[in-house]
Each structure stands twice: as C-alpha cells, then as structure tokens.
Amino acid sequence: MDKTTMQDSPDKLTSRQQEFLQSLVTLCKTRKQAVSYVDVATEMKVSKWTAYDILHGLYQRGFLRMTHEIRSSKGRSQILYSPAESMPHVSEDTRDAAESTTLKWLTGKITQYAGLGIAESINLVAERVRHEKNPFRVVLYTELMVVLFARVFRVDIDRLVNTRAIVALGLSADTILRLLSEIMFSFMRNEKWLMANLALPQRSIQEFAEWEESFMASVTQLSAGEKRLMVSVIGRTSA
C-alpha cells in the first residue's frame, strides 16, 4: 500500500502511535529542528528500537519526513524525523473516541460479570489474562476486576478504598493503576480471605501471583496516554 492510500485513513492511528507523534512534534517545536528516534525514545521512556519501529511506521504513512544527517567525525549518518509539511490531519476527537470505545467495553463487561458472582468472575478474568498477549488488555481486565470488587460485589475492598476518590487525587495515572491493583491483589494473596469469601483452593494463590506478575509487566509497556485513558474510564465507571 502506498503512502497516498495510507494518508486517506489517519483515524486508524492507535493511541500509542498518537503519543509518539505528539512527542516528536513537541520535540521538534522545542528544538526547532528534526530529531532522532533516540531523542523520542528518551522522551517516551522506551527502547530506541521501539521508538524507531513506531516512528518509521508513521513515516511510511506520510505523517513524518525522514532525513539522514552526518553527525559524527567518523561520517556516520543519523536518521532524523520531523512532521511532514502536508501531515494528514489527526482528529482531536480520536482520543475521545478511544475513551468512548474503552468505556463501552468496560461497562459491558461489568454488566456481564456482575451476574456471574465474584468467584466465577475472578476465575474467568484470570483465565483471560493468562492467555492475553496485549498489555493494554491485561491491564484493562485487571482494572475491570478492581471495579467489580469495589462497585459490584462490595467485598472488603469497598471499606478500604474509594476508587473514585483515588482517581480524583491528582496522582499520576501509573500510580493510580498500580495502587488500585495492589489493593485487589493483596486480598487475592490472603488464603483466609480466599477461603472465606470465594471458597477457592490454596493453588489459586499461585494463579493470582502469576496474574499479578503479568499485570506488572504489562503496565510498564503502556504509553502515558493509554494509562491516562484507562484511569479516566475507571473514574467514569466508578461514579
């Protein structure tokens, strides 16, 4: 597919691609020159190879210009990127659309799992997470369970944490996601609580430990925009 065709569908950008595009645009404006993928990697706190893959994809779609500039005495060239002069328009509503889609998914799952009961819901979500490869969905399924704990099942977590209040504290999105999940996982690590509330066997503790590891690994892979989007959705479902 050529660039002209790709430029006709700018709304296909993911939230992660938009984060990188915005980061590059901001860096270029600040420095008044093209920047390398290493610069963007540093800004986004990701590996340089991740930044290169995403920026090169944006270049292929016509959002960026790419140049090679010699920046060392040994004659080595460096790949530099800058916004394309005729960069396709990125709708300001794209983030709202992504949040709306995520909110619809989450509220639908809340309704679905609420009728199953807490034990079956936990087992089903744990199974989903075990086979899920997409980090965004791993974190989203985890936060679904947090909302179910606090809003639907009204277990002990409801007396310890006000999800809506935590979201409104003004903490970073990363901190909020980790804090809410840590509270839920603390119950899942408690054998007495599991037996009393869920009648689950001790082996479930190991399963939940694996779930927690998957969550911790996945949340580090999300962009800042994805984390903010998720926190916003959690706040709206907890209202």
Image (tube, helix red, strand yellow):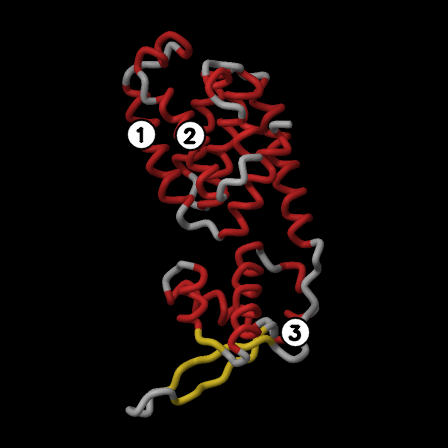
The residue at 50%/69% (across/down) is 55
- Decide: is 193 above or below 69: above
Image coordinates of residue 227 in percent, x first then y, are 51, 45
The residue tagged 1 is 209
Q: Residues within 10 Å of mark 2 (few under 14, many from 20)?
A: few
Pointer 1 local density, CA inside 10 Å: few below 14, some 14–19, many at least 20: some
Q: Relative to 56, is 94 above or below? A: above
Ranked by sequence position, the earlier of labels 3 and 1 is 3
Disc 2 and disc 3 in contact, CB within 8 angstroms: no
Inspect the image, locate mark 1, and give the three-letter code of the amino acid beneath it. Ala
Q: Relative to residue 115, is residue 64 depicted above or below? A: below
Residue underneath mark 3: 87
Name which residue lies at 39% across and 59% down. Answer: 46
Q: Residue furthest top?
A: 196
Q: Position of residue 206 (x, y in %)?
A: 28, 26
State the residue position of label 2. 127
